[in-house]
Amino acid sequence: MLEAWKFFSIRRQFTGQHFARQVYALWLEEALDKGDVSLPTGAPDFYNAKTT
């Protein structure tokens, strides 16, 4: 049972740190391109900030 808990704990951590982050970044990029979301004044461009 403990081994299963370790497996699912790591799997949940991976999902939160990798998959969900990518989905959010893609959603944000699309929302910015469509004009649904605007960047705050003084914020770097989305694509410049994404590469740093």
Image (cartoon, helix red, strand yellow):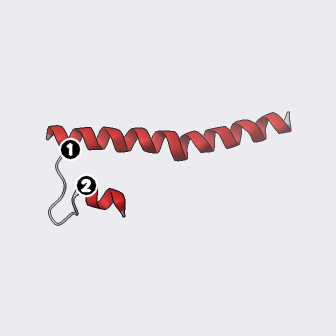
Residue 36 in view: no
Q: Nearer the viewer, residue 6 or 45?
A: 45
Which residue corresponds to the image point at 23% horizontal and 39% vertical from the top-left? 31
| Relative vertical location of residue 32 with respect to residue 40 in this rendering, above or below | above
* Mark closest to the chain's N terminus, 1 or 2: 1
Three-letter amino acid code at the position of disc 1: Leu
Q: How many marks can you see?
A: 2
Quarter occupied by the C terminus: bottom left
Q: Are marks 1 and 2 in contact (CB under 8 Å)?
A: yes
Picture coordinates of residue 40, whole percent (x, y): 18, 58
Picture coordinates of residue 1, whole percent (x, y): 85, 33
CA–CA distance in space, label 1 to label 2? 8 Å
Three-letter amino acid code at the position of disc 2: Phe
- Regarding mark 2 in the picture, which secondary structure is present there? helix
Which residue corresponds to the image point at 16% horizontal and 37% vertical from the top-left? 34
The image's mark for residue 46 is 2
Which residue corresponds to the image point at 41% horizontal and 38% vertical from the top-left? 23
Q: Nearer the viewer, residue 6 or 44?
A: 44
Indicate the quadrant where residue 4 lies.
top right
- The crowding category of the residue bearing disc 2, from other C-alpha atoms within 10 Å (few below 14, some 14 to 19, many at least 20), is few
For this view, does 9 lie left or right of residue 47? right
Picture coordinates of residue 33, whole percent (x, y): 18, 41
- The crowding category of the residue bearing disc 1, from other C-alpha atoms within 10 Å (few below 14, some 14 to 19, many at least 20), is some
For this view, does 50 lie left or right of residue 11? left
- Badge 1 is on which residue? 32
- Regarding mark 1 in the picture, which secondary structure is present there? helix
For this view, does 14 lie left or right of residue 39? right
| Relative vertical location of residue 27 with respect to residue 40 in this rendering, above or below | above
